Structure formats: structure tokens, C-alpha cells
């Protein structure tokens, strides 16, 4: 499961990296950037297929049939292997694909004594990357429209399998076109997400403070020396 991430750049840096703009009316709705502890329910910049701008979306997919937003907490992730079997995801896989920019994600390694050690994982030098996702639009009983997303997860590459048994479907910027091409079938789009090579991933231990969603500072991404 991917339930915590980081995006430690600002909006201008995202615009320069991906050539996408922000709608001014959305800027006040985003959780402030930089964000060292991106958590479920945060509003994050998302790139939809065939879009020239960032959309503001809530992390935790809310299907159209949901009675309230709480269902989103159960749909933070979508398993790559079963997306096309799940009613909550298979329609979105056809025409509601997206990518979400991050520069790190956190996973906790569980030890035999029950304790857990958090790690920050990402590309070399923690450069910006994208995670493949799906999005939905939901209308609340009061008429509020909320766009939300889920992140796709897959089996980890061997280098980080000792930390956790899942990892996000990471995409190196420039390799996202097939995933976002809605003329490509969902299965072929999923198959286009290649496993990264060991040299394309780095990680380090971080402090346990990252486990508290109220903590959000540069100290959370600092290396904890073994």
C-alpha cells in the first residue's frame, strides 16, 4: 500500500517540469506545497489524460455511487493486477487515467518484534516522478463536486522488496504517454508501466515522526544514519 508520500517542490517548479499550468481558482484548495507528508484526503495536483493543466483532486477515490467521502479512505490504492476486475476501477481505467507527481513515497518495514522502520523511496536524488492513477468525479448530496484519485500499486522491484511487498506504479517523466493515451486499451496501458531498474531507485531510513500526519517539515525527509 502507498499511504504517504512527499512533494517538496512548489507550483512554479511543477509548471516548469511538466509544462502544465494551474487554474488560479484552484490554488487556494490545494494542500500547501512543499508538502513533506502527503496523506489521504489531501488535495494534490493531478494530470489527467488529454489535459494541459493540473487538476486539484483529493487523494482517495470516491466512486459516483458513494454516499459520502469516507469511502475514499478505502480506495487510496488500486492493485495493478486486479484493476480490470473491480467495478470501482475498471470503468475509470478506460477513460479516466491520470498521473500524480511526487518526489518520494514512504513505506514502513515491519520487524519480527513488531516495530516498524520508515523509509523514503524515490528516483536518484529524489527527482520528480509520476505515479499512475485513476480519477473520478463525485457529487455530494448537497451538490458539491469533488474530483478524487487513487494510486496504482504493483509488486516491488527486488531492491526494495525487503521493505514492503507493494510499491506505487512509478513512471519516469517522459514515459507517461502510453498510460495517458486513451486510445490504448486499459490492459495495454497497464502493461506499458515498466518495472524500474535497480539503479533507478534509491531509499533511506527516515525518522518515525513521518507517521504522524500532523508533522510536515523538511526534517521528515532527512536521512537517519544506521
Image: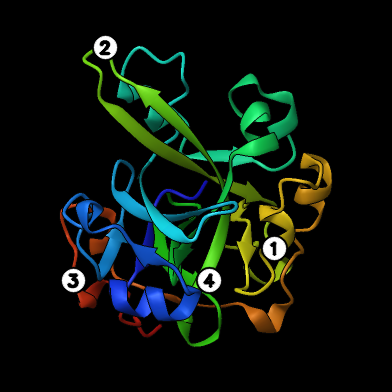
Image position, residue 84 (x, y; %): 74, 30
Image position, residue 60 (x, y; %): 41, 37
* 72 sits to left or right of 100: left
> Which one is earlier in the sequence, the residue at label 3 or at label 4?
4
| Mark 3 vs mark 4: in front | 4
- Is residue 25 depicted above or below 142 in this figure? below
CA–CA distance in space, label 3 to label 4:
20 Å
Residue at the spot x=50%, y=41% of the render? Answer: 150
Q: Are marks 4 and 1 in contact (CB under 8 Å)?
A: no
The residue that mark 3 highlights is: 217
**What colour scheme does the image use?**
rainbow
The residue that mark 1 highlights is: 177
Q: Secondary structure at mark 2?
A: loop
Give the quarter of the figure containing the C terminus: bottom left
* 145 sits to left or right of 64: left
Mark 4 crowdedness (10 Å alpha carbons): few <14, some 14-19, many ≥20: some
Image position, residue 146 (x, y; %): 33, 32
- Is residue 108 depicted above or below 174 in this figure? above
**For residue 82, what is the image quadrant?**
top right
Amino acid at each position: 500500500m502507498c499511504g504517504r508520500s512527499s512533494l517538496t517542490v512548489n507550483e512554479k517548479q511543477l509548471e516548469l517540469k511538466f509544462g502544465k499550468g494551474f487554474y488560479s481558482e484552484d490554488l487556494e484548495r490545494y494542500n500547501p506545497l512543499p508538502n513533506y507528508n502527503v496523506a489521504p484526503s489531501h488535495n494534490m495536483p493531478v494530470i489527467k489524460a488529454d489535459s494541459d493543466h493540473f487538476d486539484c483532486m483529493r487523494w482517495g477515490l470516491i466512486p459516483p455511487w458513494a454516499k459520502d467521502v469516507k469511502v475514499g479512505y478505502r480506495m487510496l490504492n488500486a492493485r495493478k493486477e486486479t484493476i480490470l476486475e473491480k467495478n470501482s476501477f475498471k470503468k475509470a481505467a478506460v477513460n479516466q487515467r491520470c498521473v500524480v507527481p511526487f518526489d518520494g513515497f514512504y513505506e514502513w518495514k515491519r520487524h519480527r518484534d513488531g516495530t516498524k522502520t520508515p523509509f523514503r523511496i524515490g528516483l536518484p536524488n529524489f527527482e520528480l516522478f509520476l505515479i499512475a492513477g485513476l480519477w473520478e468525479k463525485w457529487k455530494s448530496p448537497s451538490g458539491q463536486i469533488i474530483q478524487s484519485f487513487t494510486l496504482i500499486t504493483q509488486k516491488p522491484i527486488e531492491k526494495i522488496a525487503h521493505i514492503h511487498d507493494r510499491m506505487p506504479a512509478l513512471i519516469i517523466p517522459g514515459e507517461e504517454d502510453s498510460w495517458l493515451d486513451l486510445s490504448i486499451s486499459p490492459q495495454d496501458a497497464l502493461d506499458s508501466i515498466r518495472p524500474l531498474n535497480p539503479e533507478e531507485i534509491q531509499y533511506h531510513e527516515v525518522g518515525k515522526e513521518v507517521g504522524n500526519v500532523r508533522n510536515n517539515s523538511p526534517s521528515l525527509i532527512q536521512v537517519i544514519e544506521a
